[in-house]
């Protein structure tokens, strides 16, 4: 039985990442599978982004988080949910962030150098980073990541990969997104603990 330093899991993101990878079983083959999916899935990134944002804008509970000025956006921000559309400049700005995220995932080594990126993805959606007026509730982050996982699964199954590669790719992304989900959740748990 392997001994895990549970207190270190809360203070050392690299240690946490290593533990999650090992426990979930995200190994070298999974990392290579994600990277090798790039030529198949990379061209589909715009489609993934459009589907994801159509879903985010279909619910007031998720769309409302695009009304405040997004960190780094300098254009005209929408005043009301009625003014918010898939073509609004601030939404276009946010779509570019999702494009960047997916491109980063498809082109990265999954070693400790990715940890600050995965961690910031979690932190940026809380009041702890970015615009302090934007604190996306955890339920909305979980809904988003669950939907993104399903869209990616759909894209993988419809890709030109052979059947065995599709299955390996779905499993690899499933493991990776669970790791990402933990790096999102940890910031919400930390914020909750600080309020108590």
Image: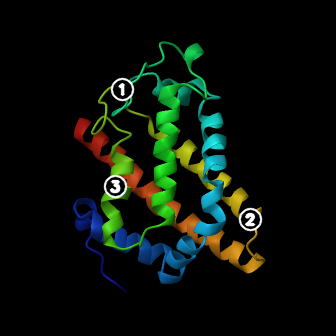
Q: For marks 1 and 3, give the one nearer the viewer.
A: 1
In the rendered view, does 182 fall on the left or right side of 189?
right
Q: Residue 193 appears at what percent x and percent y? A: 27, 43
How packed mark 1 is, by other alpha carbons closer than 10 Å (few <14, some 14-19, many 20 or more), is: few
Q: Residue 34 appears at what percent x and percent y? A: 55, 71
In the rendered view, does 38 fall on the left or right side of 125?
right
Q: Which mark is residue 159?
A: 2
How packed mark 3 is, by other alpha carbons closer than 10 Å (few <14, some 14-19, many 20 or more), is: many
Q: Nearer the viewer, residue 160 or 142?
A: 160
Task: For mark 3, give the secondary structure.
Answer: helix
Evaluate whether residue 160 shows in this view. yes
Evaluate whether residue 196 shows in this view. no
Q: Quadrant of residue 171?
A: bottom right
**Lower position in the chain sequence, tag 1 or tag 3:** 1
Quadrant assignment for the N terminus: bottom left
Which residue in the protein does label 1 denote?
A: 74
Q: Residue 41 appears at what percent x and percent y? A: 64, 62
**Lower position in the chain sequence, tag 1 or tag 2:** 1
Q: Nearer the viewer, residue 190 or 145?
A: 145
Quadrant assignment for the C terminus: top left
Give the residue drawn at x 46%, y 22%: 67
Q: Quadrant of residue 2?
A: bottom left
Q: Quadrant of residue 73?
A: top left
Q: Which mark is residue 37?
A: none
Does 147 appear above or below 104? Answer: above
The reply to whether dot 1 and dot 2 touch (C-beta < 8 Å) is: no
How packed mark 2 is, by other alpha carbons closer than 10 Å (few <14, some 14-19, many 20 or more), is: some
Which residue in the protein does label 3 denote?
A: 119
């Amino acid at each position: 039985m392997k001994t895990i330093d549970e207190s270190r899991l809360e203070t050392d993101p690299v240690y946490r990442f290593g533990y999650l990878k090992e426990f979930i079983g995200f190994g070298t083959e999974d990392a290579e599978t994600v990277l090798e999916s790039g030529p198949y899935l990379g061209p589909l990134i715009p489609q993934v982004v459009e589907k994801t944002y159509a879903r985010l804008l279909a619910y007031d509970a998720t769309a409302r988080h695009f009304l405040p000025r997004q960190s780094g956006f300098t254009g005209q921000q929408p005043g009301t949910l009625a003014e918010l559309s898939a073509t609004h400049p601030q939404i276009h700005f946010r779509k570019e962030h999702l494009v960047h995220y997916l491109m980063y995932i498809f082109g990265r080594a999954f070693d400790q150098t990715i940890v600050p990126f995965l961690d910031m993805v979690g932190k940026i959606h809380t009041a702890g980073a970015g615009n302090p007026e934007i604190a996306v509730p955890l339920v909305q982050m979980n809904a988003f990541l669950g939907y993104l996982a399903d869209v990616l699964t759909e894209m993988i199954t419809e890709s030109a990969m052979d059947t065995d590669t599709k299955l390996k790719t779905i499993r690899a992304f499933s493991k990776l997104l669970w790791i990402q989900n933990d790096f999102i959740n940890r910031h919400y748990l930390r914020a909750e603990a600080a309020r108590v």
